[in-house]
Amino acid sequence: MPDILSQGRDRDPRPWPRRLAAVGALVLAAILVTLYVTGHARSPAHTASATPTAPAPLDTPALASGAGAAPDGVTGPTLPWGSSVALPLSGDEPSWLWPASGRTRPIGGLPAAGAGYQFTRISGGWAVQVDLAGSTACSYCNTESLPVYFLGDQARSVTRIGTANLVAPGTGTGEMWLTSYSPGTDTPQGAGTAQEVSATGASLGPRLTLPAGEVIEQATDRGLLLAPAIPRPGTTADTLWDPATGRASRAFNNVIAASPTEIAWASPCAETGSGPCQVQILELETGNVTTAALPGGSSAASGAFSPDGQFLAVEASFNDGGSLAAQLDVVSLGTGLLTPVPSTWVSSDALVGFGWPDRGDSLVAELSFTTTVQVASWRPGAADLAVAALRPGRDSASLVVG
């Protein structure tokens, strides 16, 4: 799973949405300014499509009256954002953003980087590294060994922990795997060496030599989940590899999410037309497999486990009469029941990214529409989303959500 979902995308700044007010000369002046700004031209290449107008598939719950996503964003009943929730902003000078107030605070300890930074979610925080991967064919790697930093949840500054080409989440709080390749090796075609480290950079075990052409996707309680460094045509298989024996114990096709204790993969129904699409979740400790059926006419595009391992968020992709649509669903791993996230039936290019960006069980998504960019939060069981608008430009282009 490339880290694209956790990264902000480089997009042209979007204008503010129109706002209505009832009284007051100052408010009227603000409206006029806002209308002026929203009248400026936009780049068509960076304009998200409106919500699909065709009816939702038969098995997909329709949006409640007065709620849902439109060209101007999620409307209808919403909840306020929690004032304590903060999200990272990447870019050349990363900072924290509090969506409830729009307040930001710089993240200390990171030198200015013209290429910007990439954030990889690990337990208890983030691994941070200069982002050189976007300019290469290898979506999993930087092209050279670069400094790696640890940023604790809402910490004021980072701690440098080492250097590596690649970073992958470990199994414990603040733990991660750093993978390096021989000097002159630009991409991991050969065998790299991997070292598990703590949030302070201390080694947590022996350095390992990985199978040639494989990279670490996620460390688990039953070994390392490895993926091909360069995605191959057709179905891509990830393998659960035991460092002690050097052997793979199991292969998984179409992995959409992984955690230290669970792995989720999708059935190839979209390609074969073989019945309803399903997502299967393996609990590594017990070997139990939970199967969840997706809404009719949809397939699983990606997923993310909640921090406590009780939920799996899934991006369900629909072909809506020639245009692609998406909806976020959440699977309860205790029951296998799938619940649509309210107001997230949107065109696929409107869903920028999603994830569980802190230790709580709140799913966060970035949604980009014609006139506004919004960040939405949802706790399983809630009737509505919490929604906040992002400022055009840096906030909307570099938000990290999971």
Image: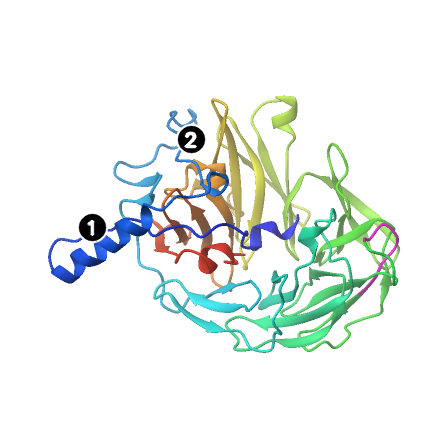
The structure's colour scheme is rainbow
Picture layout, residue 98 above or below residue 300: below
Observer able to see residue 285: no
Q: Amino acid at mark 1?
A: Leu
Binning the other alpha carbons within 10 Å of mark 1 as few (below 14), some (14 to 19) or many (20 upward) gives few
Picture layout, residue 94 above or below residue 242: below
Q: Amino acid at mark 2?
A: Thr
**At x 35% / y 39%, what residue is drawn?**
71
Observer able to see residue 307: yes
Q: Is residue 188 magenta?
A: yes
| Side (left or right) of 143 relative to 294 | right
Question: Which numbered disc covers residue 20?
Answer: 1
**At x 65% / y 30%, what residue is drawn?**
268
**At x 58% / y 23%, what residue is drawn?**
275
Residue at mark 2: 60
- Element under label 2? loop
